[in-house]
């Protein structure tokens, strides 16, 4: 085991905008915490909101962002008996109270006092990160670090939306609105969970091509031909889909989502935007028992299930890592993602280079 240096490289956010890559003291784990050497941290759309886009603000600066990470334990604090130096881990990004109604119901992603890594505590765009024990999940030797990292958000968020909120059942039909980093995994997971047919909807041809590689049965390019909901109705003999999932946060795709549902159909909203889409026409909405549901993040249990699927080789995420970059390139990566340059699915930052 290599010794831990006194100083480490970290990406620090002093205000909304660019991160500053600098040397800061390596943190020490407090009781109930471990120190994780970060192997990989996925660059997420929400990182873009707090940096280049300047559309979301943190309660406190400076802060180290990064919330989609994995690594290896290099030091343990007191009271962490179940964990050892050398353990490979995936990091669930939330610190929760464990006492509120949601926590007690096993829905800790809705905790009254939810503190997110990279927002409310220092995250994983650094060589080392202090992680409270409840956030740790064992990463099987068969799962590469970079896959463990992206499971914790880019994959678990659509998984929670489909499997838990959308209650997707085998043999049902699914429509995925928006085939970026989350949507592409929604397509893959819908097939894995037994969906009969998956419709991928996006204005970009390249995104649709990729959706096809991830298992989409029907590709619908927004702006070409009939509106997407009409194409879905046509392809399903008028029936519609059982679960529609919206990952963009756009009025038009949410409205399309309400119009493509079958009887008892569920529209699950994941995309966030300061928008107010039109209510669907109430008569069919009530008569056909439709639902519109919000879905926020994922539970630790969802991530645990995905880590299991990954270890057993139930899905192939090898194409999901678009690029691997050093911490020093983080600002460029955030700009690339913001401008969708090179159409990345997930760029991962490797603050310690390639870790075995
Ligand atoms: Zn994220
Ligand atoms: Zn709570």
Image: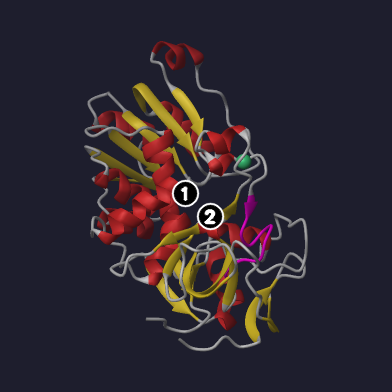
Residue 39: x, y in percent?
46, 75
Percent across and percent down for residue 91 are 49, 61
Give the position of the N terminus as an image quadrant.
Answer: bottom left
Along the horizontal axis of the image, is 256 left or right of 306?
Answer: right
Mark linked to residue 292: none
Q: Residue 244 in the image: x percent, y percent?
A: 39, 35
Q: Looking at the picture, tell me which residue is in the foreground, 312 or 53.
A: 312
- Magenta-colored span: 115-125
> Visible in this render: residue 209?
no
* In-image side of 155 versus 196 (left or right): right
Say whether marks 1 and 2 touch (CB < 8 Å): yes
Image coordinates of residue 29 in percent, x first then y, are: 62, 70
Residue 123 within the magenta-colored segment of the rendering: yes
**Magenta portion: prevailing SS class:** loop
Corner quadrant of residue 240: top left
State which quarter of the image contains the C terminus. bottom left
Give the residue at mark 1: 300
Front in this rendered view, residue 230 or 154: 154
Residue at image location 43% in from the left, 34% down from the top: 165
Relative to 189, is 27 above or below? below
Q: Is residue 181 magenta?
A: no
């Amino acid at each position: 085991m290599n010794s831990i240096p006194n100083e480490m490289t970290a990406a620090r956010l002093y205000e909304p905008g660019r991160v500053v890559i600098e040397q800061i003291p390596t943190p020490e784990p407090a009781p109930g915490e471990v120190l994780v050497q970060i192997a990989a941290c996925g660059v997420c759309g929400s990182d873009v909101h707090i940096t280049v886009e300047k559309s979301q603000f943190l309660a406190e600066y400076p802060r180290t962002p990064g919330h989609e990470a994995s690594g290896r334990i290099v030091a343990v604090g007191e009271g962490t008996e179940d964990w050892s130096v050398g353990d490979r881990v995936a990091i669930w990004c939330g610190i929760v109270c464990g006492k509120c109604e949601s926590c007690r119901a096993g829905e800790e992603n809705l905790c009254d006092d939810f503190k997110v890594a990279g927002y409310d505590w220092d995250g994983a765009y650094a060589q080392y990160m202090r992680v409270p024990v409840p956030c740790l999940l064992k990463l099987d030797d068969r799962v590469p670090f970079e896959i463990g990292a992206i499971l914790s958000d880019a994959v678990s968020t659509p998984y929670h939306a489909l499997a838990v909120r959308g209650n997707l059942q085998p043999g049902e039909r699914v429509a995925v609105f928006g085939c970026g980093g989350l949507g592409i995994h929604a397509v893959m997971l819908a097939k894995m969970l037994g969906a009969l047919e998956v419709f991928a909807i996006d204005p970009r041809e390249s995104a649709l091509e990729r959706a096809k590689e991830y298992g989409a049965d029907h590709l619908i390019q927004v702006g070409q031909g009939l509106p997407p909901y009409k194409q879905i109705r046509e392809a399903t003999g008028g029936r519609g889909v059982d679960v529609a999932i919206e990952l963009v946060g756009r009025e038009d795709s949410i409205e399309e989502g309400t119009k493509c549902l079958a009887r008892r159909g569920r529209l699950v909203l994941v995309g966030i935007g300061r928008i107010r889409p039109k209510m669907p026409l109430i008569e069919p909405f009530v008569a056909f028992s439709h639902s519109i549901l919000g879905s926020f993040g994922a539970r630790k249990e969802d991530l645990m299930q995905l880590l299991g699927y990954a270890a057993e080789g139930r899905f192939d995420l090898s194409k999901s890592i678009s690029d691997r970059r050093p911490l020093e390139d983080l600002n460029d990566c955030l700009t690339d993602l913001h401008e969708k340059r090179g159409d990345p699915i997930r760029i991962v930052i490797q603050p310690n280079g390639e870790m075995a």
